[in-house]
Amino acid sequence: MYGNKKIIVVLPAYNAAGTLRQTVADLPAITDEIILVDDNSGDDTVNVAKSLGLFVYKHEVNRGYGGNQKTCYKLALEHGADIVVMVHPDYQYDPRLVSYFAAFIGDNYFDVMLGSRVRSRRETLQNGMPRYKYYSNRFLTLVENLVSGQNLSEWHTGMRAYSRAVLESLNFGRMSDDFIFDSQTLFQICARQWRIGEIPVPVRYFPEASSINWRRSLRYGVGTLGLAIAYLFGYRP
């Protein structure tokens, strides 16, 4: 709880059994509830989550990264969340930072908080981000900033927090179940003129951390570029 605001952390999970315990252990005491949505994992994610006392919802078929988030946010709102923080259960992002995300929204500085992985090229690459992902991230972020009027350091982070009002305003029915969901979300937020803040978030790249392959990264990049061009010419999701 932050003030009188209920903080719910959502964990969109897929084959996260090996990293879930550490992720949950590092969540700060400010967290009121943890909701894990399992996207039909092939490992023991669900049993590990239940052993940790989490609220668990399992998709019977794999719905994709965006589809998983849709379920996460729907459940968080049903459970009375005032602030929802998404943390990947693969332990790539540092869960201890949840309290900072919640505080910026809880104190009414921002409506949305993003965790930026990009502070300097040297640090980002040293932390393990593949070079092709770093340079595509920089290019896409530049384009998205230009067409949206924002000045964000990164559009493609997987650690995000939203106020209840923001989530209730989004049209999830018009959004993809794939990875481009994240970009669609931010363009909707820009169109609705919600206040976006960001803080630096160190990340870890290691074999257990989930990451999309080159082919899916290319599809994501092309889709994001197309979305940005459509926004430039007046499309508003």
Image (spheres, rainbow, N blue to C red):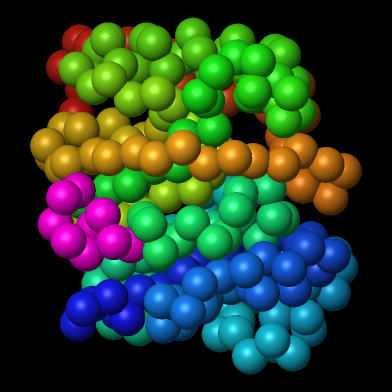
Total number of numbered discs in the rendering: 0
Residue at 61 percent across and 49 percent down: it is 93
**Residue 152: x and y, percent?**
33, 25
Residue at 27 percent across and 20 percent down: it is 151
Residue at 49 percent across and 67 percent down: it is 10
Quadrant (top left/top right/bottom left/bottom right) for the N terminus: bottom left
173 shown above or below 229: below
Q: Is residue 75 visible?
A: no
104 shown above or below 153: below
Quadrant (top left/top right/bottom left/bottom right) for the C terminus: top left
The residue lying toward the viewer, choosing from 77 and 202, is 202
Residue at 57 percent across and 60 percent down: it is 95
Give the magenta range: 102-110
Q: Is residue 135 visible?
A: yes
Asked which quadrant contains residue 227, the reply is top left
**Residue 206: x and y, percent?**
83, 42
**Residue 25: x and y, percent?**
66, 74
Left or right placement of residue 231 versus residue 119 in this view: left
Asked which quadrant contains residue 162, the reply is bottom left
Left or right placement of residue 200 versus residue 107 in this view: right
**Residue 39: x and y, percent?**
66, 63
Left or right placement of residue 151 versus residue 109 in this view: right
Asked which quadrant contains residue 216, the reply is top right
211 shown above or below 52: above
- Magenta segment: does it hold 199? no
